[in-house]
Image: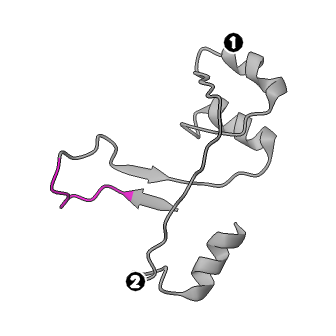
Amino acid sequence: FTMRRNEKYWGAPPSVREIVWRPVKEDAARIAAIESGQADIINQVPVHEIERLKRNPRVRVEMLRGLRVLYIGLNPAHKPFDNKLVRQAFNYA
């Protein structure tokens, strides 16, 4: 899933031009991606990997405590989300 900056936005442009979301279910694959530079951010880091990642100079570990809700709204008025099958695929991903 790729999100691109809206160049017609009325306010100051965001500093990020594009964000690519790639779901990675396997813990080891997420860890390898952050260590190799293939990913800029990962979440759901296994507790037993945190100290090792903190020792890696190429990785910055930030921990937050508390409850969190992550929401991505899909606008069914625009492609590809006007397709029910695409929305269902996102639901099952």
Q: Which residues are magenta?
A: 4-11
User: Residue 35: image x %, image y %?
Assistant: 66, 29
Residue under label 2, please give it. 77
For the C terminus, the quadrant is: bottom right
Taking depth in this image into account, of 51 and 11 the one nearest to the observer is: 11
The kind of residue on which mark 2 rests is Ala
Main secondary structure of the magenta stretch: loop
Seen from this angle, which residue lies furthest left?
Answer: 10
Residue under label 1, please give it. 55
Q: Quadrant of residue 64 in the image?
A: top right
How many numbered discs? 2
Circle 1 SS class: loop
The residue located at (60%, 50%) in the rendering is: 69
The residue located at (57%, 21%) in the rendering is: 60
> In the rendered image of this protein, does residue 57 appear above or below residue 6?
above
Position of residue 65 in the picture relative to residue 28 (left or right): left
The residue located at (28%, 44%) in the rendering is: 14
Position of residue 17 in the picture relative to residue 52 (left or right): left
Q: Residues within 10 Å of mark 2 (few under 14, many from 20)?
A: few
Q: Is residue 8 magenta?
A: yes
Position of residue 19 in the picture relative to residue 44 (left or right): left
The residues bearing labels 2 and 1 have C-alpha atoms spaced at a distance of 46 Å
Q: Residues within 10 Å of mark 1 (few under 14, many from 20)?
A: few
The kind of residue on which mark 1 rests is Arg
